[in-house]
Amino acid sequence: MLKIAFHPIYKHELPKGHRFPMEKYDLLPQQLIYEGTCIKDNFFEPKIPNNRHFFAVHDPEYFFNLLNITLSQKEARKIGFPLSEELIAREMIITDGTIKASKFALKNGIAMNIAGGTHHAFSNRGEAFCMLNDQAIGAKYLQQEGLAKKILIVDLDVHQGNGTAEIFRNDASVFTFSMHGKSNYPFIKETSDLDIALKNETKDAEYLSVLKKTLPKLINQEKPDFIYYLCGVDVLETDKLGKLSLTIEGCKERDRFVLQTCHDFNIPVMCSMGGGYSPIIKVIVDAHANTFRLAQEIYF
């Protein structure tokens, strides 16, 4: 059975006018159940995990300053959210969702987190709506528990996974692959193990051609025994913050190729949803829902 991390806190309310679409975290599971892609038993509710999981990735001083809301104004401003105890608890619960989904993926081949993909969180700071790097923490959890040795992070959000790149800069046991918009945020990029920067308005055919040439070769080269997939839908042409031009169908084909490739190579994959900022919420929800539909189609 497909297992999906979801907690009511995911839909945390932000001040009116904030551009981050929190409502998608509530609407997506509703849509999946309504259309019959999922049932209630597909979903599990994560909790706040032990702090030791965060210390495998994040500097303790940064973590406790975040936890106690004692970051400097400059540090807090870079995160972009008005910080609160509930918001930080949300980030911690999202991370637990990714840790637990990673274990479900080992059992079932795939598992998902309705939220996550917080790839702009560095070891010692947060940026751009990201405070704790859920997939980086999940990767180190699997390794420390002896559940995986070599991990591949496939980051196909429109924005480079700069925090993830920094965290694993000197760690050969985790290979970071980011395919993103060249002129999108972050404007000063970190160096992933493999970065593919695409020009503005890259469309379906070119995007998919590059991905299909790259991913199987990368798997054969690195031989990972676990894959994290960050499947942001901010690659859509309708996205307010992205500069690529994929259609809904192209984004779906991207997900189909990644999931089918993981399935064919028999490598467990854990998916975090990442970004999506199209002005019409239905477009965001439908694009994200395609990832879950494909997971059910390919694996179950």
Image: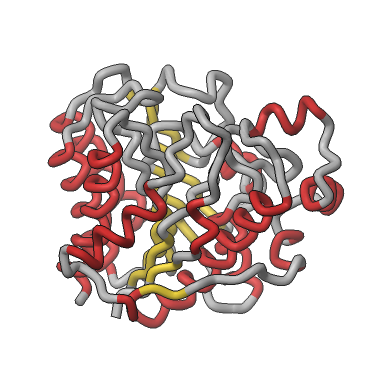
Residue 293 picture quarter: bottom left
Q: Position of residue 139 (x, y in %)?
A: 56, 62
Front in this rendered view, residue 41 or 112: 41
Q: Does residue 222 show up?
A: no
Q: Position of residue 230 (x, y in %)?
A: 41, 49
Quadrant in which the C terminus appears: bottom left
Q: How is the image coloured?
A: secondary structure
Judged left or right of residue 215, residue 205 is left
x 46%, y 44%: residue: 22
Judged left or right of residue 298, residue 80 is right
Judged left or right of residue 210, residue 59 is right
Front in this rendered view, residue 268 or 252: 252
Residue 158 picture quarter: top left
Q: Position of residue 263 (x, y in %)?
A: 25, 68
x 43%, y 61%: residue: 113
Front in this rendered view, residue 284 or 148: 284
Quadrant in which the N terminus appears: bottom left
Q: Is residue 267 above or below residue 173?
A: below
Q: Does residue 26 show up?
A: yes
Q: Residue furthest front?
A: 16
x 33%, y 24%: residue: 198
x 21%, y 31%: residue: 246
Q: Position of residue 176 (x, y in %)?
A: 50, 46
Q: How many marks?
A: 0
Judged left or right of residue 200, residue 83 is right
